[in-house]
Image (spheres, rainbow, N blue to C red):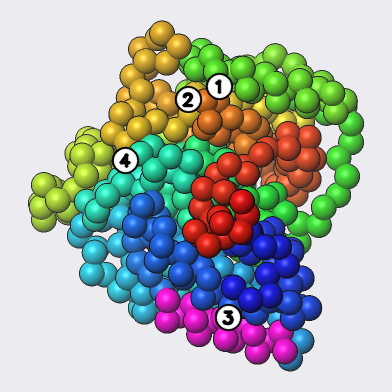
Amino acid sequence: MANLPDAGDSPLFWPVHRLLAAYRSGALSPVEVTNEVLARIDMFNPALNAYLTRMDEMARKQAKQAEQAYRKGEASPLCGVPISIKDTFAVAGVRTTYGSYFFQDNVSDADSGLIARLRASGAVFTGKTNTAEFGQSATTDNRLGPDAGNAWDETRTPGGSSGGAASSVAAGLASVGLGADGGGSIRIPAAFTGLFGFKPTHGLCADENGCVAMTEFVCPGPLARTVDDGRRFMEVIAESRFERRSVAKGLRIAWSAAPEGRPVDPAVASVIEGALAKISDMGHEIIDAAPPIDDWKTIFGPLVLSVEHQERGDLLERGAENLTDYERETLQAGRLIGPEEVATAKADLDVYRLRIDEFFDEYDVIVTPTTATTAFTHGERPTVVDGREVSELWGAFPFTPQYNVAGTPGASLPCGLSDGLPVGLQVIAKRTNDHFLFDLSADLEEVLAFDNSAMRQKWLAPEMRSEAS
């Protein structure tokens, strides 16, 4: 590709600020970069199944509009930046499957509110990414085709339900990915693919006329290679400024090595311990503490199941055999949830959130492993972790849904490798403290200094590999 400042590298791996600077200076054109990302999707998506639907024509049109905007000096915040969109968000005139066999031919009439904001930002939409059916699994498998693959090892899961979004960014098939997190669906894929994932405070990012699922818990957010990339993306979808500010030394950090006594793979725990030592060296205080989260399941389960059955219970009669096992079981369980159980869960939700708010009166942030294991082989969810039997449902990723119930902002930062696979560190802040969590995440990113060069080299185009060598 012409005008690349660095031979052997792709602008699809550049931080967004560098890409925007190249556009402003004229060193690169959004049309050139869009042509490259579409060529890379041609080349690499068959191995990853990151995308369910291509949007090439729209992307090229948006890229030309972005090019003209730069010429006129009218560029919007994400002008020309290639972004992928999880296939639970409606884009006008484009197929929206929700990862479901029943919606494989569904074409959206209009943009949802969040997509409208991203469109106005000048972003280039590369395609709709693979997702668990209706976002109901922590892996990305459905009835529409092969599982999404992990950019570090295609035979392994990228997590879910925003696994396609994570794979698209990790492999350089987009600059930033739009995901959604109702129980860990951004943070889990971020941990498994070595990305920064951010779940905002519940309610911060509205998606008017969007998908109805996990309504008390779900939050749209970015999967990105850097904190700054995620910050820029969040400014658009939250319609709020997130300027970087300094973070005071001496934060009181509540460290929970194994929340609720859940086991963690020893190799993962070792990487996390190394990250904690670096954080301590920054001048922060690491304090063993147990956040009051034990009753989250009695709130999360009824509210998720009741909404899912209310919205999609008819699919059991329309053809249960065409549902994934996990969605069928979810809808069947939803039948058993009565209005009194829902009312109790909603009342308990308010109490739970206030209790977590009060915990933050004593601590500035909570830190845990994001997941209990690294990415595992497709279809082989761990049932044993560190010699202990665990739930197949939550065993590999038991540490995220508590904070969807709490409504707090949460981030996963890559902090090292275990046997060549990424490990994520989860950082949780008090409700509405999203700006602070971005600032702290930026500081931690610098100290943790995660190296993804081996994975980037893997996904260079063949001609770029030869130049790099």
Q: Residue 223, relative to residue 326: is it above or below? A: below
> Circle 2 sits on which residue?
373
| Residue drawn where x is 86% and y is 49% of the image | 245
Q: Identify the magenta region.
A: 56-71
Secondary structure of the residue carrying numbered label 2 = loop
Q: Residue 14, relative to residue 132: is it above or below? A: below
Secondary structure of the residue carrying numbered label 4 = helix
Horizontal and vertical percent position of residue 138: 39, 38
Horizontal and vertical percent position of residue 70: 71, 84
| Chief secondary structure of the magenta portion | helix
> Circle 4 sits on which residue?
305
> Circle 1 sits on which residue?
268
Horizontal and vertical percent position of residue 344: 41, 33
**How far apart are labels 2 and 4 at the CA level?**
26 Å
Residue type, label 1: Val
| Residue drawn where x is 33% and y is 28% of the image | 381
Residue neighbourhood size for the residue with mark 2, other residues' Cα within 10 Å, grouped as few (<14), some (14–19), many (≥20): many
> Circle 3 sits on which residue?
31
Residue type, label 2: Thr
Horizontal and vertical percent position of residue 447: 78, 35
Looking at the image, is mark 2 or mark 1 earlier in the sequence? 1
- Do residues under tags 2 and 1 come within 8 Å of each other at their CB atoms? yes
Q: Is residue 120 left or right of residue 17?
A: left
| Residue drawn where x is 59% and y is 86% of the image | 65
Looking at the image, is mark 3 or mark 4 earlier in the sequence? 3
Residue type, label 4: Leu
Residue 66 part of the magenta-drawn span: yes
**How far apart are labels 4 and 1 at the CA level?**
31 Å
Is residue 130 something one can see in this rendering?
no
Q: Residue 353, relative to residue 102: is it above or below? A: above
